[in-house]
Amino acid sequence: MGRLSFRVSLRGMLDGIACVAVLLALKTRSDRFARISEQHQIKSLSVRFVGSPDEAMNSLVSLPSLEAIQRHHADLAMKYDRAASRPWSIVPADPPAPDLGPDFELEVRFRR
């Protein structure tokens, strides 16, 4: 039986290190997009008016406005979920959030 000869050159080692670095960068980018997606999913499920019922009645924030902000965060969650599955692709800038006025506050609570 003959011996297998495996020759390692400096260039081959550098190419291998570069490939590993690219794969690690893509994994890191994918994880970051997955985290952003999860944050937007949580926000889309937890949008509500914070304040007393009287403040809610007198507020300019309406149910369609709350639905718009929920839809905005749900769309962003889907966008970043797709980006997490394709970390090599370009991700466009986020669209601006719907303006709901100064009485609106987004409250996020985590249950464990």
Image: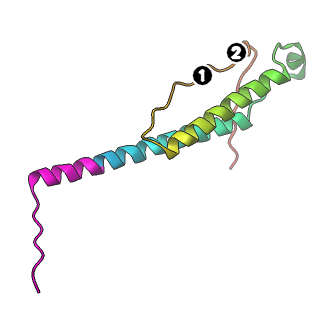
Query: Which residue corresponds to mark 2?
Result: 99
At 32% from the left and 45% from the top, the residue drawn is 22
Query: Which residue corresponds to mark 1?
Result: 95
Q: Position of residue 108 (x, y in %)?
A: 69, 34
- Mark 2 residue element: loop
| Residue type for callout 2 | Asp
Above-or-below relation of 44 to 69: below
Which of pointers 2 and 1 indicates the residue nearer the eye?
A: 1
Q: Is residue 49 visible?
A: no
Above-or-below relation of 26 to 69: below
Would residue 48 appear left or right of 37 to someone viewing this image?
A: right
Q: Could you say which is closer to the camera, residue 35 or residue 2?
A: 2
At 70% from the left and 46% from the top, the residue drawn is 111
Quick one: label 2, few (<14), some, or many (20+) residues within 10 Å? few
Would residue 94 appear left or right of 103 to someone viewing this image?
A: left
Question: Which span is picked out in magenta?
Answer: 1-20
At 66% from the left and 31% from the top, the residue drawn is 73
Q: Residue furthest front?
A: 2
Quadrant the N terminus occupies: bottom left
The stretch drawn in magenta includes residue 8:
yes
Would residue 56 appear left or right of 27 to someone viewing this image?
A: right
Quick one: label 1, few (<14), some, or many (20+) residues within 10 Å? few
